[in-house]
Image (spheres, rainbow, N blue to C red):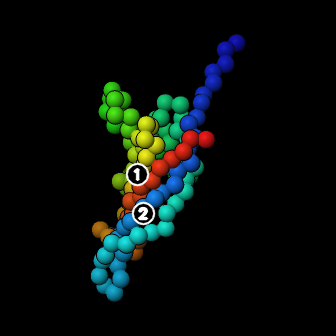
Amino acid sequence: MSTSVSAEIVLYCQSELTAGLIKENGTWKTTHFNNDRYTIKFNDDYSILMGINEQNWTCQDSYSNSEYNTIMCYSPYQNGGSFSYHKKTNRFMKVDNTTFGYISKGEDTSTISAGTCQKF
């Protein structure tokens, strides 16, 4: 009987800057949003990201030889959302894209966040 152990990589991430576009008095402008905290999990080979929007995001190394240590993850909603994570610096960048934002109805906005993660 064989048993396999699957390790997860658990990270606590804190955004340090979050910005986006809002419409005030009929004019679009850039603005800052509240920073967020995330507890996320990668599976052992960094191919799946869990913990954002309660969905599994598909990930891959940014380059096939893994030389750059950057993992790129893509939203399952196919809306252009992404989460990039650098394994050595523990920095991340998250893009929340919405189909109802600036390019559509203007009722919601897309944001970009940047910050750092700590391993548990």
- The dot on residue 14 is none
Residue 97 vs 43, above or below: the answer is below
Residue drawn at (52%, 39%), measured in percent from left and top?
A: 42
Considering depth in this image, is 53 or 93 the residue closer to the camera?
93
Can residue 88 be spotted in the picture? yes
Residue 73, image x, y percentages = 42, 44
Residue drawn at (56%, 41%), measured in percent from left and top?
A: 119
- Left or right: residue 102 compared with residue 33: left
Furthest toward the bottom, the residue is 25
Say which quadrant the N terminus sits in: top right
Tell me the kind of residue under disc 1.
Met
Looking at the rendered structure, the secondary structure element under dot 2 is strand
Residue drawn at (40%, 75%), measured in percent from left and top?
A: 107
Residue 105 vs 47, above or below: the answer is below
- Left or right: residue 45 compared with residue 65: right
Instruction: Please tell me how many numbered marks the rendered image carries.
Output: 2
Sooner in the amino-acid sequence: mark 1 or mark 2: 2
Furthest toward the right, the residue is 1
Residue 112 vs 13, above or below: the answer is below
Snapshot quadrant of residue 67: top left
Mark 1 nearby-residue class (10 Å; few <14, some 14–19, many ≥20): some
Looking at the rendered structure, the secondary structure element under dot 1 is strand
Residue 35, image x, y percentages = 49, 63
Distance between the alpha carbons at the discs numbered 1 and 2:
10 Å
Residue 43, image x, y percentages = 54, 35
Q: Which residue is mark 2?
A: 18
Can residue 50 be spotted in the picture? no
Residue 16, image x, y percentages = 46, 59
- The dot on residue 93 is 1
Mark 2 nearby-residue class (10 Å; few <14, some 14–19, many ≥20): some
Tell me the kind of residue under disc 2.
Thr
